Amino acid sequence: MDWSPRVEALVRELSRLPGVGRRSAQRLAHHLLRCPEDQARLLAKVIEEARDRIRPCARCGNYAEEELCPLCVDPRRDHGILLVVEKPSDIAAFETTGKYRGVYHVLGGLLSPLDGVGPDRLNIATLRERLAPGTIREIVLATPASTEGDSTAMYLQRMVPADTRVTRLARGLPAGGELEYSDSLTVLQAFEGRIPA
């Protein structure tokens, strides 16, 4: 269908968002064009302000408006347990459980030599500083179950002081998962990570 060039540009930009295909982008564009003008302008303003004011936390790399994010300055959190994640959005998965009360460290990516991503391109120097002997009791490596995630975890494991406990997230079959539809690596990890009944 032929849209005006500006409608087409809006659809094109919206379709660049993760999980938004062309049809969803068209629906969003039409919604934005017919909703009250103040609502559309507020959305644009909020996006602009977020881009202007949000930056990486100087300590952990999470999203922050000040030098440190709210999680790093929260005295109720256990600063002796450090959970390492790939990106800020991974933090939400742990926070929604309401069970994890430690702090985080965001790497900003994963090691991928084939793509030119080495340790110097990740938030590893700050992590080294945080791992000064006696400061962290446990570091939880929550990198994804992928080649890049596993190699990043192995790299990080080598730099952790000997007196610091290192753990990884458990892996295996998802709740409700069917064995016949699971790949062999998932089944193997579920078997090796088995727990007493």
Image (spheres, rainbow, N blue to C red):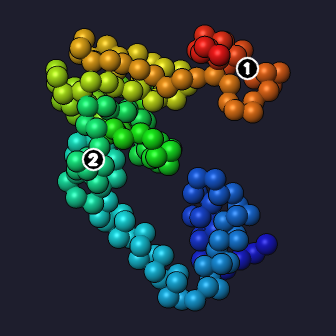
Mark 2 or mark 1: whose residue is earlier in sequence: 2
User: Is residue 136 in view from this perspective?
Assistant: yes
Q: Amino acid at mark 2?
A: Arg
Q: Residue at x 41, y 73 (%)?
A: 46
Q: Is residue 10 above or below residue 162?
A: below
In three-dimensional space, the C-alpha distance between marks 2 and 1, rounded to whole angstroms, equals: 41 Å
**Extreme front residue here?**
197
Q: Residue at x 58, y 57 (%)?
A: 16
Residue 35 is left or right of residue 89, and the answer is: right
- Of the pair 5 and 7, the residue shown nearer to us: 7
Q: For numbered disc 2, what is the local secondary structure?
A: loop
- Of the pair 12 and 17, the residue shown nearer to us: 17
User: Is residue 114 in view from this perspective?
Assistant: no
Circle 2 packing at 10 Å, graded few (<14), some (14-19), many (20+), is few
Q: Residue at x 46, y 75 (%)?
A: 44
Which image quarter is the N terminus in?
Answer: bottom right
x and y, in percent, of residue 192 in the image? 60, 10
- Of the pair 182 and 146, the residue shown nearer to us: 182
Which image quarter is the C terminus in?
Answer: top right
Q: For numbered disc 1, what is the local secondary structure?
A: loop
Q: Quadrant of residue 23?
A: bottom right
Of badges 2 and 1, nearer the viewer stands 2
Per the rendering, the mark at residue 175 is: none
Circle 1 packing at 10 Å, graded few (<14), some (14-19), many (20+), is few
Q: What residue did someone put label 1 on?
A: 183
Per the rendering, the mark at residue 76 is: 2
- Of the pair 119 and 63, the residue shown nearer to us: 63
